[in-house]
């Protein structure tokens, strides 16, 4: 378990953040004091009546504090009062501004992809230098992922220029996103603009950290490939700013890529010694642990897990179970010892937070992640116990795993029903299976166990199909209601790409059809896991000329993407039409933050649904995507 024109923006800022002189709350979003400063406690009111969060029992505020980059994300559970929802936040002293969205589970209101903006002010009453530029930087970079901001290059450039006019020194601080906005606004003049800007930068005597970082990266990439220059600025960056992200990422990558286990372990320990507060250290140890798991030596795996307990990411222990549980010759009792360590590590993470919160995570998201880690560890533990036929011990463990999460892993639900069947608790099995099926969390194994329990209770399965169909009808109604809240209507970005046979495919040529775009990569586990279900989808609609499936291969890390994708499709016998997004342009145009991501495009060329990730069953995927298709036809 893994995005306006300036006049519209200007008007929205006036409407959304301006408060009257007597500081009364008004509108959907308002706050006081009206001109807050860093460190001030800010009271926020949100009126959800006309938003997609209307009528919900709980709403969280997710606040993203920024300067030239994201500083930190926090969340606050809002209090419901007669005239709206209220909460308080206090921006840190180094903040220039705040971007906010309102959330209830997977439903969020981000002010029509603009974010709810709070500019911060100095004690002199003037807007903080960098508040507008920081908002533009968010729109160009991190805000696309975490708030799903959509910002045109012209809009960002206008904000940068407004801030730079009165504070020219800010250009140094925002050099990378600023030039990014220029490139996006004037794509035909990119080379000449960058050549000029690079010349100005290289002529400077005292380069800032941001400028050195930009030059290092820019001279690593086309059309300005200059390895010698890039290395020159990297060394300057390393000397002056040894904890810069580029330095950390490069050193991290060296450890990650090392193949010799002993050397890799030493390098990881040295990296953690030098950078003890780096937020991804537990993943670095996981990469070492993955090589230990590859040895299939359970004694070594257990010793590593014990030595690096509360250092390695708890997913290490789950990986060991997944890789070895069904491996011939595995000592299941030893594997149970490894799994027990995983539960211990996950419980410790909830209590002591040895894996730090990432700055992009709100506190609510961080707590959910920790709950997921424990749920996953408990599920792995129960899987091993099930293999050992210790069903009575497995039962409370799998029940705790399911209780930790609202969106439970399908495998955990199926295992729970399997355990109840083995314990011959047919009454509880029936009760729980009915709930899961009505919630759309079914699987073939759950249906089989329920059918057997039904047969034992009634002495016949004569009416079972009718009984099951009524449960599934409720699941269908629930899914439809859920999807009604998620439906959108946004023009789909146009594209032309070649498929594996060299044929050009243009979205514009498919107008009048319902198009399902599935962005994927061969290295992406959830993408691969979703493909059996997507093959079922392709088969289901193969005789319908008005439904078209396109699988867009992006973000590959190989020299020959065509051969890589072709070999994968052929090996797995999929009859997908795969398009090659070699330059990752289309996936960028669609603001994809993670894969797999599916877009359902209606016959008028508008995106109606966006579905991210996969952790369910093939049957569940077919039901969900089929329902989306039928809703937009």
Image: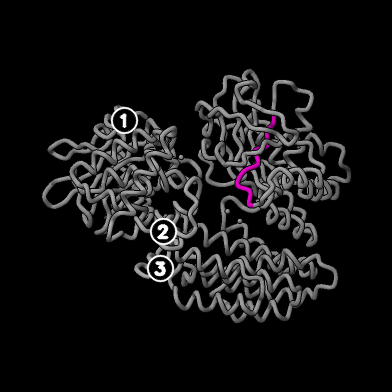
Q: At 88% from the left edge and 43% from the top edge, which residue is drawn?
A: 460
User: What is the C-alpha distance between the residues marked 3 and 1?
Assistant: 39 Å
95 with respect to 449 (left or right): left
Residue pointed to by mark 3: 238
Label whose residue precedes the other's in the sequence (2 or 1): 1
Camera-side mark, 3 or 1 = 3
Residue segment shown in magenta: 549-557
Left or right: 596, with 487 as reference point: right
Q: Is residue 609 above or below residue 529?
A: above
The quarter of the displayed image where residue 484 is located:
top right
Secondary structure beneath dot 2 equals loop
State the residue at coordinates (62%, 61%): 376
- Viewer-proximal residue among 37 and 200: 200
Report the Cα–Cα distance between label 2 and label 3: 23 Å
Q: Is residue 391 visible?
A: no
Residue 349 left/right relative to 597: left
Query: What is the x, y in percent for residue 549?
Result: 69, 31
The quadrant of the image that shows the C terminus is: top right
Who is closer to the viewer here, 238 or 602? 238
Residue 513 colored in magenta in the image: no
Q: Is residue 124 above or below residue 382?
A: above
245 over 175 or under it: above or below:
below
Q: Which residue position is annotated with label 1? A: 6
Q: In the rendering, at what x and y percent does residue 469 appear?
A: 75, 34
Q: Quadrant of residue 372?
A: bottom right
Residue at image position (84%, 45%) is: 458
On residue 359, the disc is 2
Dot 3: what SS?
helix
Neighbor class of circle 3 (other Cα within 10 Å; few <14, some 14-19, many 20+) is some
Alpha carbons under labels 2 and 1: distance apart: 29 Å
Residue at the far left in the pictured view: 124
Q: Of residues 480 and 630, which is closer to you in this image?
A: 630
């Amino acid at each position: 378990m893994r995005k306006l024109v300036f006049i519209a923006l200007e008007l929205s800022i006036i409407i959304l953040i301006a408060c009257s002189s007597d500081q009364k709350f008004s509108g959907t979003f308002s706050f006081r004091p009206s001109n807050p400063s860093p460190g001030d406690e800010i009271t926020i009111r949100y009126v959800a009546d006309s938003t997609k969060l209307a009528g919900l029992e709980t709403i969280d505020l997710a606040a993203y504090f920024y300067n030239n980059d994201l500083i930190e994300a926090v969340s606050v559970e809002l209090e419901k009062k007669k005239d709206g929802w209220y909460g308080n936040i206090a921006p840190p002293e180094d903040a220039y501004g705040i971007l906010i969205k309102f959330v209830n589970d997977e439903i969020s209101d981000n002010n029509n992809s603009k974010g709810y903006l709070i500019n911060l002010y100095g004690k002199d009453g003037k807007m903080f230098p960098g508040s507008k530029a920081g908002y533009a930087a968010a729109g160009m970079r991190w805000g696309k992922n975490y708030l799903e901001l959509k910002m045109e290059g012209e809009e960002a450039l206008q904000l940068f220029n407004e801030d730079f006019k009165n504070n020219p020194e800010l250009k140094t601080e925002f050099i990378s996103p600023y030039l990014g906005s220029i490139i996006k606004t004037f794509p035909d003049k990119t080379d000449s603009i960058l050549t000029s800007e690079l010349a100005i930068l290289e002529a400077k005597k005292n380069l800032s950290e941001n400028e050195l970082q930009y030059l290092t990266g820019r001279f690593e990439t086309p059309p300005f490939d200059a390895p010698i220059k890039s290395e020159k600025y990297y060394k300057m960056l390393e000397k002056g700013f040894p904890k810069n992200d580029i330095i950390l990422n490069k050193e991290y990558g060296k450890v990650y890529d090392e193949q010799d286990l002993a050397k890799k372990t030493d390098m990881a320990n040295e990296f953690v010694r030098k950078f003890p507060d780096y937020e991804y250290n537990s993943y670095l140890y996981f990469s070492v642990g993955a090589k230990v798991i590859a040895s299939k030596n359970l004694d070594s795996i257990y010793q590593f897990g014990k030595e690096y307990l509360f250092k390695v990411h708890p997913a290490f222990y789950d990986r060991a179970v997944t890789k070895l549980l069904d491996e011939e010759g595995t000592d299941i009792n030893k594997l149970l010892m490894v799994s027990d360590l995983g539960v211990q590590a996950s419980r410790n993470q909830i209590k002591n937070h040895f894996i730090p919160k990432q700055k992009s995570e709100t506190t609510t998201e961080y707590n959910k992640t920790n709950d997921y880690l424990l749920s996953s560890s408990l599920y792995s533990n129960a899987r091993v116990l099930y293999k050992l036929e210790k069903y009575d011990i497995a039962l409370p463990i799998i029940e705790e795993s399911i209780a930790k999460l609202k969106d439970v892993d399908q495998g955990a639900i199926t295992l729970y029903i399997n355990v109840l069947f083995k314990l011959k608790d047919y009454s509880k099995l029936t009760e729980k299976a009915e709930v899961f099926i009505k919630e759309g969390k079914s699987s073939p194994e759950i249906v089989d166990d329920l059918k057997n329990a039904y047969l034992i209770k009634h002495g016949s399965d004569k009416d079972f199909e009718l009984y099951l169909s009524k449960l599934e009808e409720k699941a269908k109604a629930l899914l439809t209601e859920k999807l009604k809240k998620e439906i959108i209507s946004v023009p789909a970005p146009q594209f032309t790409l070649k498929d594996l046979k060299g044929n050009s495919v243009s979205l514009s040529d498919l107008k009048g059809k319902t198009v399902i775009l599935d962005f994927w990569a061969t290295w992406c586990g959830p993408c691969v896991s979703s493909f059996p279900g997507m093959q079922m989808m392709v088969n289901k609609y193969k005789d319908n000329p008005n439904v078209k499936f396109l699988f867009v291969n992006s973000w590959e890390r190989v020299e020959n993407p065509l051969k890589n994708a072709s070999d994968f499709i052929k090996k797995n016998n999929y009859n997908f039409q795969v398009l090659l997004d070699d330059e990752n342009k289309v996936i960028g145009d669609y603001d994809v933050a993670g894969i797999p991501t599916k877009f359902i495009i209606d016959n008028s060329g508008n995106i109606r649904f966006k579905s991210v990730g996969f952790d369910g069953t093939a049957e569940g995927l077919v039901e969900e995507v089929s329902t989306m298709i039928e809703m937009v036809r």
